[in-house]
Amino acid sequence: MATLRQLEYLVTVVDTGSFTRAAELLHVSQPALSHQVRALERDSGGPLLERLPRSVRLTPMGRAMLPHARAALADAGRARSAARRAAGLEAGELQLAAVYSVTLGVLPPVLNVWHKTHPHIQVRLLEHRHAAELHDTMTAGHADLAVGPRPPSWDGLLRELGTEEFVVVVSADDPAAEQGATHVRLKTLADRSWVHYATGNGLAEILDRTCAAAGFRPHTAVRTEQTAAAPLLAAAGLGPALVPANVVPPHFAGRLLRPDPPVRRTLTAYTRPHPDPLTTAFLDTLAEHARVMPPHVHDQLVPCPPAG
């Protein structure tokens, strides 16, 4: 297979019209240059250059290859330039993996700051339903950085972003929210039908596990594929929903209740052991501007009394 170095040798010989001058320009010996050109010719299936007494000229095969050789060298130059610009945070693309709830609640203010400070760096979001899918994406090397629940194991760099708190969402006239209630014991909701999540969504497992710890299995009123739909459906009166507090939008029509006992999980950002400058810069922005508990939700909640 032709290498970029062999293509560079071919182009330089053509441009200078001489193996001797090409070798001088490339700082290699003439025998080494000739050897690489012959190797390229063998790989191509025939002669690319005709050696004349005082010059060289392209054969028909050589004329066919030359524009592609120039294009390959130009592409390689652009690739090097793009990598250097990314290292200098001037341009590039960051591949960011996250679970759905993080995309809805944690990332928007972070991405807003990032776009303002690095307008030429594109962010490609890879969104996942489950923390296990997120971990698999990072393990396979398909993303530069992952944001989500703490992975079961990780050999690279991991940074905690904070503790994510879950709330129970109900409609404004729900009996559980009467008399200004700010918290609810989950076992009192055992006979209710819940807004549930589609199978495969990690939040479905959290709801099932949380209800099981409270001594019941939740009945289902509706299952939604979209995490963002759960609080809206609950506010519309279909039943309670257990949602990460950070996905609840401002000026929300429903009521938020803190579950007793509390439901929490740690959010992290993780990447490879030695991240590149672009990933490191985004990780620093994430650590500074991520808000695991948004202010508009915090203002509606008061500390939960001890379970008993």
Image (spheres, helix red, strand yellow):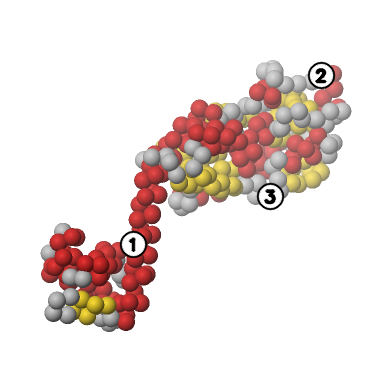
Query: Which of pointers 3 and 2 lies earlier in the amino acid sequence?
Result: 2
Q: Residues within 10 Å of mark 2 (few under 14, many from 20)?
A: few
The residue that disc 2 covers is 180
Q: Which mark, by number, is residue 240?
A: none
87 over 253 or under it: above or below: below
Mark in front: 1 vs 2: 1
Q: Nearer the viewer, residue 6 or 289?
A: 6
The residue shown at (83%, 39%) is: 238
Mark in front: 3 vs 2: 2
Q: Position of residue 137 (x, y in %)?
A: 51, 50
Q: Nearer the viewer, residue 83 or 56?
A: 56
Query: Which of pointers 1 and 2 lies earlier in the amino acid sequence?
Result: 1
207 over 261 or under it: above or below: below
The residue shown at (18%, 70%) is: 18
Q: Amino acid at mark 3?
A: Thr
Q: Position of residue 250 (x, y in %)?
A: 72, 29
Contact flag, marks 3 and 1 (Cβ < 8 Å): no
* Rendered image quadrant of residue 244: top right
Q: Position of residue 279 (x, y in %)?
A: 44, 40
* Rendered image quadrant of residue 62: bottom left
In this rendering, position of residue 121 left or right of residue 277: right
Q: Amino acid at mark 1?
A: Leu
Q: Which mark, by number, is residue 73?
A: 1
